[in-house]
Amino acid sequence: MPELAPAVERFTDELARRNESDHTIRNYGADLREFIAYFTPPGSAPPPIEEIDLLALREWLGHLYDRKLQPTTIRRKLASVRALFRFLVREHVIERDHARMLRLPKMPKSLPEVPNAETANRLVDGALPDGIERPHPKRDRLLLELLYGCGLRVSEVVGLNLEDIDRTQRWLRVRGKGRKERQVPYGEKAAVALDAWLNDRESKSNALFVNHHGGRLTDRGARGIVKFYARFIVSDSSIHPHTLRHAFATHLLSAGADLRSIQELLGHARLSTTQKYTKVSLEDLMRVYDKSHPKAG
Protein backbone atom coordinates (compact mmCIF):
# COMPACT_ATOMS: atom_id res chain seq x y z
CA MET A 1 0.00 0.00 0.00
CA PRO A 2 1.35 3.48 -0.84
CA GLU A 3 2.73 5.40 2.12
CA LEU A 4 1.52 8.89 2.99
CA ALA A 5 4.86 10.75 3.03
CA PRO A 6 6.07 9.50 -0.40
CA ALA A 7 2.61 10.28 -1.82
CA VAL A 8 2.92 13.89 -0.65
CA GLU A 9 6.43 14.13 -2.07
CA ARG A 10 5.18 12.80 -5.40
CA PHE A 11 2.44 15.44 -5.41
CA THR A 12 4.78 18.37 -4.68
CA ASP A 13 7.16 17.12 -7.40
CA GLU A 14 4.22 17.25 -9.79
CA LEU A 15 3.50 20.85 -8.76
CA ALA A 16 7.08 21.75 -9.65
CA ARG A 17 6.78 19.99 -13.03
CA ARG A 18 3.60 21.99 -13.69
CA ASN A 19 5.66 25.13 -13.12
CA GLU A 20 3.59 26.29 -10.15
CA SER A 21 5.05 29.25 -8.28
CA ASP A 22 7.54 28.75 -5.45
CA HIS A 23 5.01 30.44 -3.15
CA THR A 24 2.31 27.88 -4.04
CA ILE A 25 4.63 24.89 -3.67
CA ARG A 26 5.92 26.18 -0.34
CA ASN A 27 2.39 26.63 1.05
CA TYR A 28 1.18 23.23 -0.15
CA GLY A 29 4.29 21.60 1.28
CA ALA A 30 3.89 23.22 4.70
CA ASP A 31 0.19 22.30 4.95
CA LEU A 32 0.78 18.70 3.86
CA ARG A 33 3.75 18.19 6.20
CA GLU A 34 1.44 19.25 9.02
CA PHE A 35 -1.20 16.82 7.66
CA ILE A 36 1.36 13.98 7.76
CA ALA A 37 2.37 14.90 11.32
CA TYR A 38 -1.24 14.69 12.52
CA PHE A 39 -1.55 11.09 11.30
CA THR A 40 1.90 10.00 12.52
CA PRO A 41 2.03 8.58 16.08
CA PRO A 42 5.16 9.51 18.08
CA GLY A 43 8.04 7.20 17.16
CA SER A 44 6.13 5.66 14.25
CA ALA A 45 6.04 6.04 10.48
CA PRO A 46 3.13 7.76 8.68
CA PRO A 47 0.31 5.35 7.75
CA PRO A 48 -0.51 4.11 4.25
CA ILE A 49 -2.64 6.65 2.39
CA GLU A 50 -5.44 4.08 1.97
CA GLU A 51 -5.96 4.03 5.74
CA ILE A 52 -7.01 7.68 5.74
CA ASP A 53 -10.74 7.35 5.14
CA LEU A 54 -13.56 9.89 5.41
CA LEU A 55 -13.91 9.42 9.18
CA ALA A 56 -10.18 10.03 9.71
CA LEU A 57 -10.32 13.14 7.52
CA ARG A 58 -13.30 14.49 9.48
CA GLU A 59 -11.40 13.98 12.73
CA TRP A 60 -8.45 15.87 11.24
CA LEU A 61 -10.78 18.70 10.15
CA GLY A 62 -12.29 18.79 13.65
CA HIS A 63 -8.76 19.12 15.02
CA LEU A 64 -8.28 22.25 12.91
CA TYR A 65 -11.47 23.76 14.33
CA ASP A 66 -10.38 22.83 17.87
CA ARG A 67 -7.21 24.87 17.32
CA LYS A 68 -9.42 27.95 16.71
CA LEU A 69 -7.84 28.58 13.31
CA GLN A 70 -9.30 31.26 11.07
CA PRO A 71 -11.74 30.04 8.38
CA THR A 72 -9.32 31.26 5.69
CA THR A 73 -6.54 29.11 7.17
CA ILE A 74 -8.76 26.03 7.44
CA ARG A 75 -9.94 26.50 3.85
CA ARG A 76 -6.33 26.73 2.64
CA LYS A 77 -5.26 23.58 4.50
CA LEU A 78 -8.31 21.70 3.27
CA ALA A 79 -7.66 22.86 -0.29
CA SER A 80 -4.13 21.44 -0.04
CA VAL A 81 -5.43 18.04 1.11
CA ARG A 82 -8.16 18.01 -1.53
CA ALA A 83 -5.60 18.74 -4.24
CA LEU A 84 -3.41 15.89 -2.95
CA PHE A 85 -6.26 13.37 -3.03
CA ARG A 86 -7.40 14.48 -6.50
CA PHE A 87 -3.88 13.99 -7.79
CA LEU A 88 -3.54 10.54 -6.21
CA VAL A 89 -6.85 9.35 -7.70
CA ARG A 90 -5.85 10.71 -11.10
CA GLU A 91 -2.52 8.88 -10.87
CA HIS A 92 -4.30 5.66 -9.77
CA VAL A 93 -2.40 5.64 -6.47
CA ILE A 94 -5.71 5.39 -4.57
CA GLU A 95 -9.18 4.42 -5.75
CA ARG A 96 -11.46 6.79 -3.80
CA ASP A 97 -11.23 10.51 -3.14
CA HIS A 98 -12.56 10.82 0.41
CA ALA A 99 -11.37 14.43 0.72
CA ARG A 100 -13.96 15.70 -1.77
CA MET A 101 -16.67 14.86 0.79
CA LEU A 102 -15.31 17.39 3.29
CA ARG A 103 -17.16 20.70 3.47
CA LEU A 104 -15.33 24.01 3.41
CA PRO A 105 -16.02 26.36 6.32
CA LYS A 106 -18.05 29.44 5.44
CA MET A 107 -16.13 32.66 5.09
CA PRO A 108 -17.26 35.68 7.11
CA LYS A 109 -18.54 38.42 4.81
CA SER A 110 -16.03 41.02 5.90
CA LEU A 111 -14.90 43.83 3.65
CA PRO A 112 -11.18 44.62 3.27
CA GLU A 113 -9.83 47.50 5.32
CA VAL A 114 -8.75 50.17 2.86
CA PRO A 115 -6.82 53.36 3.65
CA ASN A 116 -8.12 56.47 1.93
CA ALA A 117 -6.27 57.96 -1.03
CA GLU A 118 -4.62 60.62 1.13
CA THR A 119 -3.14 58.02 3.49
CA ALA A 120 -2.02 55.75 0.65
CA ASN A 121 -0.29 58.60 -1.19
CA ARG A 122 1.29 59.86 2.02
CA LEU A 123 2.75 56.39 2.60
CA VAL A 124 4.15 56.09 -0.92
CA ASP A 125 5.44 59.68 -1.20
CA GLY A 126 6.35 60.42 2.40
CA ALA A 127 9.80 60.72 3.91
CA LEU A 128 10.97 58.87 6.98
CA PRO A 129 11.50 60.90 10.17
CA ASP A 130 14.96 62.40 10.74
CA GLY A 131 17.43 59.91 12.11
CA ILE A 132 15.77 56.85 10.55
CA GLU A 133 17.61 55.50 7.52
CA ARG A 134 17.15 52.55 5.16
CA PRO A 135 19.89 50.71 3.20
CA HIS A 136 17.96 50.93 -0.10
CA PRO A 137 15.43 53.78 0.06
CA LYS A 138 15.11 53.97 -3.76
CA ARG A 139 14.23 50.28 -3.93
CA ASP A 140 11.69 50.72 -1.16
CA ARG A 141 10.06 53.69 -2.89
CA LEU A 142 9.69 51.71 -6.13
CA LEU A 143 8.24 48.75 -4.22
CA LEU A 144 5.56 50.96 -2.67
CA GLU A 145 4.84 52.64 -6.02
CA LEU A 146 4.20 49.30 -7.76
CA LEU A 147 2.14 47.82 -4.93
CA TYR A 148 -0.22 50.79 -4.77
CA GLY A 149 0.18 52.21 -8.28
CA CYS A 150 -0.25 48.86 -10.07
CA GLY A 151 -2.17 46.77 -7.54
CA LEU A 152 0.29 43.88 -7.69
CA ARG A 153 0.28 40.96 -5.29
CA VAL A 154 3.42 40.79 -3.16
CA SER A 155 4.48 37.53 -4.88
CA GLU A 156 4.05 39.24 -8.26
CA VAL A 157 6.11 42.29 -7.39
CA VAL A 158 9.07 40.34 -5.95
CA GLY A 159 8.85 37.97 -8.93
CA LEU A 160 9.49 40.76 -11.45
CA ASN A 161 12.66 40.39 -13.53
CA LEU A 162 14.51 43.11 -15.41
CA GLU A 163 13.34 41.73 -18.76
CA ASP A 164 9.71 42.04 -17.63
CA ILE A 165 9.89 45.84 -17.86
CA ASP A 166 9.06 47.80 -21.01
CA ARG A 167 10.41 51.21 -20.06
CA THR A 168 9.45 52.76 -23.41
CA GLN A 169 5.74 51.91 -23.21
CA ARG A 170 5.62 51.68 -19.39
CA TRP A 171 4.34 48.12 -19.17
CA LEU A 172 5.15 45.33 -16.76
CA ARG A 173 4.86 41.64 -17.60
CA VAL A 174 3.40 40.17 -14.43
CA ARG A 175 3.16 36.48 -13.54
CA GLY A 176 0.10 35.95 -11.38
CA LYS A 177 -1.57 32.94 -9.80
CA GLY A 178 -1.10 29.73 -11.77
CA ARG A 179 1.77 31.42 -13.68
CA LYS A 180 -0.77 33.32 -15.76
CA GLU A 181 0.85 36.34 -17.37
CA ARG A 182 -0.74 39.73 -17.83
CA GLN A 183 0.41 43.18 -18.91
CA VAL A 184 0.07 45.97 -16.34
CA PRO A 185 0.81 49.66 -17.06
CA TYR A 186 2.69 51.86 -14.63
CA GLY A 187 2.60 55.62 -14.25
CA GLU A 188 5.04 58.50 -14.44
CA LYS A 189 5.88 58.53 -10.72
CA ALA A 190 6.64 54.81 -10.83
CA ALA A 191 8.80 55.42 -13.94
CA VAL A 192 10.83 58.02 -12.05
CA ALA A 193 11.21 55.67 -9.07
CA LEU A 194 12.22 52.82 -11.42
CA ASP A 195 14.95 54.91 -13.09
CA ALA A 196 16.28 55.99 -9.69
CA TRP A 197 16.45 52.40 -8.42
CA LEU A 198 18.03 50.98 -11.58
CA ASN A 199 20.72 53.67 -11.45
CA ASP A 200 21.41 52.79 -7.81
CA ARG A 201 21.01 48.99 -8.04
CA GLU A 202 24.17 46.83 -7.88
CA SER A 203 23.52 43.15 -8.44
CA LYS A 204 24.15 40.41 -11.01
CA SER A 205 20.68 38.98 -10.32
CA ASN A 206 18.02 39.42 -13.00
CA ALA A 207 15.48 40.15 -10.24
CA LEU A 208 14.19 43.74 -10.18
CA PHE A 209 14.04 43.81 -6.37
CA VAL A 210 17.11 42.51 -4.58
CA ASN A 211 18.03 42.25 -0.91
CA HIS A 212 21.21 43.37 0.83
CA HIS A 213 22.96 40.16 -0.30
CA GLY A 214 22.20 40.90 -3.95
CA GLY A 215 19.67 38.05 -4.25
CA ARG A 216 15.97 38.28 -4.99
CA LEU A 217 13.89 40.04 -2.35
CA THR A 218 11.49 37.58 -0.69
CA ASP A 219 7.77 37.95 0.04
CA ARG A 220 8.64 38.24 3.71
CA GLY A 221 11.22 40.93 3.01
CA ALA A 222 8.72 42.98 0.99
CA ARG A 223 6.11 42.70 3.75
CA GLY A 224 8.67 43.90 6.27
CA ILE A 225 9.48 46.94 4.14
CA VAL A 226 5.81 47.92 3.82
CA LYS A 227 5.20 47.47 7.53
CA PHE A 228 8.29 49.55 8.39
CA TYR A 229 7.24 52.53 6.24
CA ALA A 230 3.59 52.27 7.31
CA ARG A 231 4.66 52.40 10.93
CA PHE A 232 6.95 55.41 10.64
CA ILE A 233 5.15 57.48 7.99
CA VAL A 234 1.41 56.98 8.61
CA SER A 235 1.60 55.40 12.09
CA ASP A 236 -0.31 52.28 11.02
CA SER A 237 1.72 49.07 11.15
CA SER A 238 -1.39 47.04 10.20
CA ILE A 239 -0.94 48.09 6.56
CA HIS A 240 0.57 45.29 4.46
CA PRO A 241 1.11 44.75 0.69
CA HIS A 242 -2.40 43.38 0.10
CA THR A 243 -3.84 46.47 1.80
CA LEU A 244 -2.28 48.54 -0.97
CA ARG A 245 -3.75 46.19 -3.61
CA HIS A 246 -7.19 46.69 -2.06
CA ALA A 247 -6.62 50.45 -2.03
CA PHE A 248 -5.56 50.42 -5.70
CA ALA A 249 -8.81 48.73 -6.75
CA THR A 250 -11.10 50.72 -4.47
CA HIS A 251 -9.65 54.08 -5.43
CA LEU A 252 -9.86 53.24 -9.16
CA LEU A 253 -13.50 52.27 -8.76
CA SER A 254 -14.28 55.42 -6.76
CA ALA A 255 -12.70 57.51 -9.53
CA GLY A 256 -14.99 55.97 -12.17
CA ALA A 257 -12.99 53.03 -13.58
CA ASP A 258 -15.17 50.17 -14.82
CA LEU A 259 -15.14 46.83 -13.05
CA ARG A 260 -13.96 44.80 -16.05
CA SER A 261 -10.85 46.96 -16.45
CA ILE A 262 -10.05 46.63 -12.76
CA GLN A 263 -10.49 42.85 -13.07
CA GLU A 264 -7.91 42.77 -15.88
CA LEU A 265 -5.44 44.93 -13.96
CA LEU A 266 -5.75 42.79 -10.82
CA GLY A 267 -5.56 39.51 -12.72
CA HIS A 268 -8.76 38.12 -11.20
CA ALA A 269 -10.08 35.03 -12.95
CA ARG A 270 -13.68 35.83 -11.92
CA LEU A 271 -15.48 39.15 -11.96
CA SER A 272 -17.21 38.17 -8.71
CA THR A 273 -13.84 38.44 -6.94
CA THR A 274 -13.48 42.03 -8.12
CA GLN A 275 -17.06 42.95 -7.21
CA LYS A 276 -16.25 43.04 -3.49
CA TYR A 277 -14.70 46.45 -4.12
CA THR A 278 -18.10 47.82 -5.15
CA LYS A 279 -19.29 47.08 -1.61
CA VAL A 280 -16.34 48.99 -0.16
CA SER A 281 -17.11 51.97 -2.39
CA LEU A 282 -20.80 51.88 -1.46
CA GLU A 283 -19.86 51.95 2.22
CA ASP A 284 -17.66 54.99 1.53
CA LEU A 285 -20.59 56.68 -0.24
CA MET A 286 -22.89 55.96 2.70
CA ARG A 287 -20.40 57.49 5.13
CA VAL A 288 -20.19 60.62 2.98
CA TYR A 289 -23.99 60.76 2.76
CA ASP A 290 -24.50 60.27 6.50
CA LYS A 291 -21.93 62.94 7.28
CA SER A 292 -22.90 65.53 4.66
CA HIS A 293 -26.53 65.35 3.60
CA PRO A 294 -29.04 67.41 5.64
CA LYS A 295 -31.65 64.62 5.40
CA ALA A 296 -29.26 61.86 6.46
CA GLY A 297 -30.07 62.26 10.13
Image (cartoon, grey):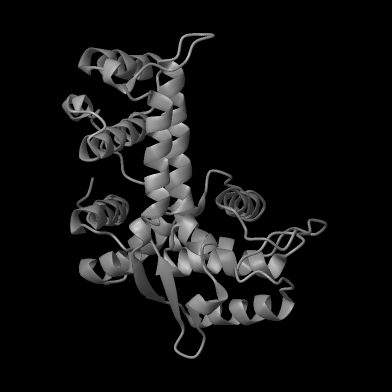
* Residue 101 versus residue 178 in the image, above or below: above
Does residue 43 appear in this view? yes
Residue closer to the observer: 87 or 3: 3
* Residue 197 versus residue 38 in the image, above or below: below
Q: Quadrant of the N terminus?
A: top left
Q: Residue furthest right?
A: 131
Residue closer to the observer: 292 or 121: 121
Q: Quadrant of the C terminus?
A: top left
- Say which residue appears at 16% left-offset and 25% top-offset: 101
Residue closer to the observer: 158 or 13: 13
Residue 257: image location, x then y, percent? 27, 72
Residue 272: image location, x then y, percent? 19, 54
Residue 73: image location, x then y, percent? 38, 32
Q: In the picture, residue 86 is in which quadrant?
A: top left
In this image, 46 relative to 215: left or right? left
- Say which residue appears at 38% left-offset and 16% top-offset: 47
Does residue 258 appear in this view? no
- Say which residue appears at 42% left-offset and 30% top-offset: 6
